Amino acid sequence: MASQAASVNEAGSGITRREFLYYIWGASIVLLTVEGAGLLIWSLIPRFREGEFGGRFMLPVESLPDQNAPPANFANGRFWLSNLNTEQPNELMYQAPDEGPSIGAVAIYKVCTHLGCIYAWTPANDRFECPCHGSKYRLDGRRIESPAPRTLDRFKMFALAEDKTTVLAESPLSDNFFDPMKVPDGTAFLSIDTGDRKQGPSDVLLCDFTGTCP
């Protein structure tokens, strides 16, 4: 009787070989599923190289135009560089009644905020103009005339030292939009992050202030 009780207790306290194999099989399936999901997520995460749209573009600081001069076009990065100073206004850049001073560099996305057309700088009129539906923008990307629903989007910028790694300044963020970045002395390179874009606000049309809206 004692030996029978011992064998019963021993059988009840362990697992069979079949159960053990089931556990191993189930754990293997779970592990393979987790690994497969991880690889899928990793493959879906976009990875961009420097100099490729979606990544960063490093430019010598000499690429930045003079203050309130026509913008510089960077087709590969899909952006314009503008250098602003409303304290020394001209026909291209000036301070509107609802604005504070605007001084520094901005990187402006080259896509119209209306229906996604590619706009261009029009030297004859000193402004950005969209050929599709006539939206117009100032040097800093603010709307002059509709149908654009908002100001042009901007990318984040960094001012870098000669070593290309030391950050001397970066685009300040205000109301989830990049303000102009003042370029400090000692800046050797500008880095534009085309993977970090902020949508422009829906400011009052500039033509409303002058009463010249169509």
Image (cartoon, rainbow, N blue to C red):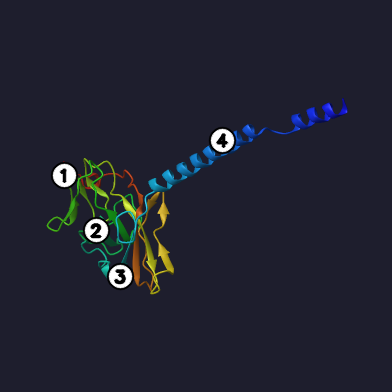
Say left or right for 211 vs 95.
left
Say left or right for 140 vs 214.
right
Q: Residue furthest right?
A: 2
- Real-space Cα separation, disc 1 to disc 3, in angstroms: 33 Å
**Residue shown at 29% from the left, 47% from the top:** 151
State which tag comes first along the sequence, 4 or 1.
4
Amino acid type for the residue under numbered disc 1: Gly
| Residue corresponding to mark 2 | 76
**What's the mark number on residue 197?**
none
**Of the two numbered discs 1 and 3 in the rendering, the one whose residue sits closer to the viewer:** 3
State which tag comes first along the sequence, 4 or 2.
4
- Dot 2 falls on a residue whose secondary structure is loop
Amino acid type for the residue under numbered disc 3: Pro
Say left or right for 208 vs 155.
left
Amino acid type for the residue under numbered disc 4: Gly
Q: Nearer the viewer, residue 21 or 111?
A: 21
Where residue 153 appears, as percent x and y from the top left, is 31, 50
Amino acid type for the residue under numbered disc 2: Asn
- Real-space Cα separation, disc 4 to disc 2, in angstroms: 50 Å
Q: Quadrant of residue 161?
A: bottom left
Where residue 125 appears, as percent x and y from the top left, is 14, 55
**Residue shown at 49% from the left, 44% from the top:** 35
Q: Is residue 73 above or below residue 111?
A: below
| Residue corresponding to mark 1 | 134
Q: Quadrant of residue 163?
A: bottom left
- Real-space Cα separation, disc 4 to disc 1, in angstroms: 63 Å
